[in-house]
Amino acid sequence: MTQNRTMEILVGAFMAVGFLALFFLSMQVSNLSSSNGGEGYQVLARFDNIGSLKVRSPVTMAGVRIGRVSDIAFDRKTFEAVVTLRIDSGYEQSIPDDTFAKIFTAGLLGEQYIGLDAGGSSTFLTEGGQITLTQSALVLEEIIGQFLFSKAEEGTKIE
Amino acid sequence: MLEQLARLGRIGIGSLEQLGRGHLLLLYMLAGISELFTRPRLLLNQLFSVGVLSVLIVAISGTFVGMVLGLQGYYILSQFGAEQTLGVMVAASLVRELGPVVTALLFAGRAGSALTAEIGLMKATEQLSGLEMMAVNPVKRILTPRFLAGFVAMPLLAAMFSALGVLGGYFVGVGLLGVDDGAFWSQMQTKIDLYDDVLNGVIKSLVFGFVCTWIALFQGYGSAPTSEGVSRATTRTVVHSSFAVLGLDFILTALMFGE
């Protein structure tokens, strides 16, 4: 009888530890704790070029992550990228409608993210709102190309 | 020439026959699950021998694998000035691959071989025939509880492996090598996805648990009832399980993480 009891306890402990490990993996290791599901609201932003921005890329304001990119689509009429940003709940009434959206790169080789610079307007974006002021991603090749081009131009002027 | 062809044919038919027997056994085992719920103690006993007794080897291996990942990852990542992403590397490789796969290999060696030897010896000593004489279905009574226990225990063991591995990597990376504590966890939390990474790892370990236990029980049940037969069956269990795990891992990875 006592042997049975010890076995029951050990099996119970085994299962408890196993589920605890699963819980640890999902809470501490993965992004469950930092993402709050489908809540919040969505705003649109149009960019000429989004570089390597991806769905789930962070959206930050003053460096604080306030949402994620939830969808990226291509507008066939205007040839622009339409990026849907899902802003976490708790940040309602915090994005003025003249906010400036830029695509930044974290570090030299890091991933790209959207940084929002708040404007001065007193009306705020709501569900389905659109950010009109945007700045495209910096594509390194383009910058180098422009740099070389301007250097070459300088050279011809001096002569 | 004709003799060679006949041999090839024999091998083909033989392996098909084995496959058929294996699937029939699986069907019989699955059919016995409903009866198992009336006798949960059978499952409890098997969970003890399959799960609890495997905890130690899984826990120790997991910790050391995580620590080695921490050391190796730090060495490579520090060359690019990216030590901060050590947490991501350790957690991603553990949760996605090493956790399920290494646990399955250990499981096949520790629990699978024990299952095969046990069933094989039961067969060799005619205990299974004895059960049948008493009108007790040996598949339902002996095999089904072991099968279900393996299926339940494997994901739990893999989760322990991954969790301890992450802690091992944390110990080496943050404790010994001086990676920033906050960056280690925050990078990990932003990059590791609950569904893409953790859940897929759990699905992998469920599949591996299913396959490893199935192979072990089939080999034991189909072993020749001699001491040599049992030893061969045990060897086959470990070899076949390892092949199956590594092959399936490739297929599952391609299905889950391929674009």
Image (cartoon, coloured by chain):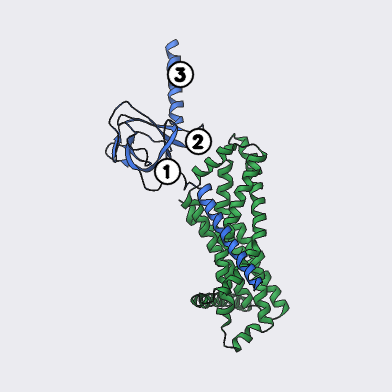
Q: Residue B54 location in percent, x, y?
A: 65, 63
Above or below, comparing residue B101 to residue B190 in the picture? below
Amino acid type shown at disc 1: Arg
Q: Mark 2 points at which residue?
A: A110
Question: Mark 3, mark 1: which one is toward the viewer?
Answer: 1
Q: For the N terminus of chain B, which image quadrant?
A: bottom right
Cα separation, mark 1 vs mark 2, equals: 15 Å
The residue labelled by disc 3 is: A151
Q: Which chain carries label 3?
A: A
Amino acid type, mark 2: Gly
- In the image, farthest residue toward the right: B227
Marks 2,3: beta carbons within 8 A: no
Residue A96's image quarter?
top left
How far from the left and from the top, in percent, is residue B35?
50, 78
- As drawn, the label of residue A28 is none
Q: Which chain does the numbered disc 1 sit on?
A: A
Closer to the camera in the image, A81 or A150: A81
Identified at 62% across, 50% down, the residue is B165
Q: The blue chain is which one?
A: A
Could you confirm whether marks 1 and 2 are on the same chain? yes
Give the label, 2 or 3, closer to the camera. 2
Secondary structure of the residue carrying numbered label 3: helix
Which residue corresponds to mark 1? A56
Dividing the picture into quarters, in which one does residue A158 lie? Answer: top left
Q: Which of pointers 3 and 1 lies earlier in the amino acid sequence?
A: 1
Given residues B238 and A32, the one toward you in this image is: A32
Chain for colour green:
B
